[in-house]
Amino acid sequence: MSDPVPPVPSPAPRLVVVDGANVVGSRPDGWWRDRAAAAERLRDRLAGEGLPGCAGPVEIVLVVEGAARGVASVPGVRVEPAPGSGDDRIVELAAENAGRSRLVVTADRELRRRVTELGAEVTGPRAVWG
């Protein structure tokens, strides 16, 4: 009698890390009047629509900073408050998840450079707003 073949683990879902401040700031819709509410609108859009064009299972993490730190997670979107710089927290998340597919949503050139050096892919805010 042979030993049973263990199941093949399914790959972790793609990690999508959204630079909240950068994506919110990419549209002049009055976000500066209430940064937390603007982050909540972004979170809700991501929870409802995901990231258009991003196929397969994904884990969406919205990194917030400053006045948006109190925004809560919802099903489908984990909100990660950055204790300091949002960019630094995004780089940490990319490094901590090196064994899986990662996509960072930002237009920040320096942040794009830092995460691509870690093997992450990048896309701009238009991926969220269409």
Image: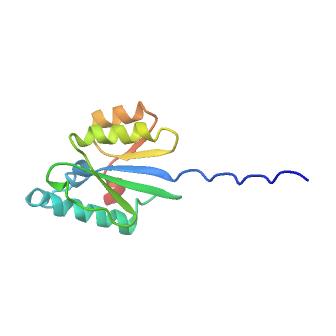
Q: Residue furthest top?
A: 117
Question: What percent of the width, then of the height, locates residue 120?
Answer: 44, 39
Taking depth in this image into account, of 76 and 120 the one nearest to the observer is 76
Query: Quarter-wise, where is residue 69 in the image?
Result: bottom left
The tally of labels here is: 0
- 41 left or right of 116 in image: left
The answer to whether any part of residue 54 appears in the image is no
Residue at image coords 34%, 60%? 130
Query: Quarter-wise, where is residue 48 in the image?
Result: bottom left
Query: Quarter-wise, where is residue 108 in the image?
Result: top left
Residue at image coords 42%, 39%? 96
Question: What percent of the width, then of the height, locates residue 12?
Answer: 54, 51
- 92 left or right of 13 in image: left
In the rendered view, tell whether residue 113 sits above or below residue 32: above
Question: What percent of the width, then of the height, locates residue 81?
Answer: 25, 50
In the rendered view, tell whether residue 1 sits above or below residue 37: above
- 92 left or right of 86 in image: right
- 5 left or right of 59 in image: right
In the rendered view, tell whether residue 106 sits above or below residue 72: above
